[in-house]
Image (cartoon, grey):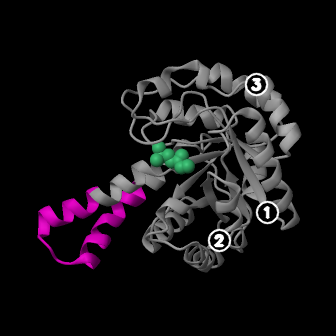
Amino acid sequence: MPYVSTMEIFKDGLAKGYGTPMFNCINYEMIRWCIEVAEEERMPVIIGHYFGFETNMDPAVSKMVTKYYAEKAKVPVALHLDHCPSASICYGRMKHFRSVMIDGSHYDFEENVRITKDVVRVAHQMGIVVEAELGKVGSAAKLEDISNPDNYTDVMQAIEFVERTKCDSLAVSIGNAHGTYVSAPNLAFDRLKELRSALDLPLVLHGGSGIPDEQFGRCAVEGMSKFNVFTDFNLALGSGIIKSYEEKGNKGGLTMLVDAREGCKEVIRHKMRMVNPKGLHVV
Ligand code: 13P
């Protein structure tokens, strides 16, 4: 199957009732494992690339590896440029992607609209779809960031934001945050329901690590399309390497990476099943 746009995956997911995880990958192995699990589960997957991880992974390499395995796969695979905090970071990488995120949520509403609108105009001319963000998705390490309803995406603002920016999908805040949660989050499903019925575009959940399974799965049932995951995946890689060392000593990088594979694939499989409440297969 050729490698597809995120929007193709979202449309199918919304019609059939499944969500799709996006895993930020920092190396070749993580991309390969995501696509292997997607094939085993017979469900789509989105590979994420983040500029902050470019000390290890160039965007051109993310694209090359994803495209190589996507073209061999039977399931849809998409590649997405995650969290660009500025238009220039986004523009500098756009040629490698068919799906990008501009995150202007750290600006005030008007500035977020302005930046997002600019990126959408340029991206759409290139046939690229744009995810934007409204509301504060903060740090899971800060109780204030996950418990303050003032951080949630405002429904009326979201309607205006989507109308003015013409973004293709929207990342929202409902008490979710990035990283390891200080205490289990209590996602605001009332707000998600309101957003889902007020907006006619795919919704995105950031901070997909450490959210209790029941809440994570419920987001898919409530119509969320994309689920961003990094911390749980990255920690699984670290734990797998440590375990290999503890059990075998230093047998070298290859042994450690191979030993870490199953634990990482388990995280991918678990998240994928969680957002597929009907247990569907697309192929
Ligand atoms: P976590 O690291 O909390 O899983 O968040 C990932 C994310 O939202 C990337 O955009």
Ranked by sequence position, the earlier of labels 3 and 1 is 1
Residue 262 location, quadrant: bottom left
Q: Residue at image x 65%, y 78%?
A: 71
Q: Nearer the viewer, mark 2 or mark 1?
A: 1
Task: Examine the rendering and report whether any part of residue 251 can be seen.
Answer: yes
Ranked by sequence position, the earlier of labels 2 and 1 is 2
Residue nearest the observer in this picture, 120 or 185: 120
Q: What amino acid type should be assigned to the residue bearing mark 3?
A: Val
Residue nearest the observer in this picture, 245 or 111: 111
Classify mark 3: helix, strand or loop.
helix
Tag 1 residue: 128
Tag 3 residue: 155
Q: What amino acid type should be assigned to the residue bearing mark 2?
A: Lys
Residue 134 location, quadrant: top right
Real-space Cα separation, disc 2 to disc 1, in angstroms: 23 Å
Q: What amino acid type should be assigned to the residue bearing mark 1?
A: Ile
Residue 246 position within the rendered picture, expressed as x and y whole percent measured from the top left: 13, 62
Magenta part of the protein: which range?
Answer: 239-266
> Dot 2, crowdedness within 10 Å: few (<14), some or many (≥20)?
some
Give the position of the N terminus as an image quadrant: bottom right
Residue 183 position within the rendered picture, expressed as x and y whole percent measured from the top left: 37, 27
**163 lies above or below 1:** above
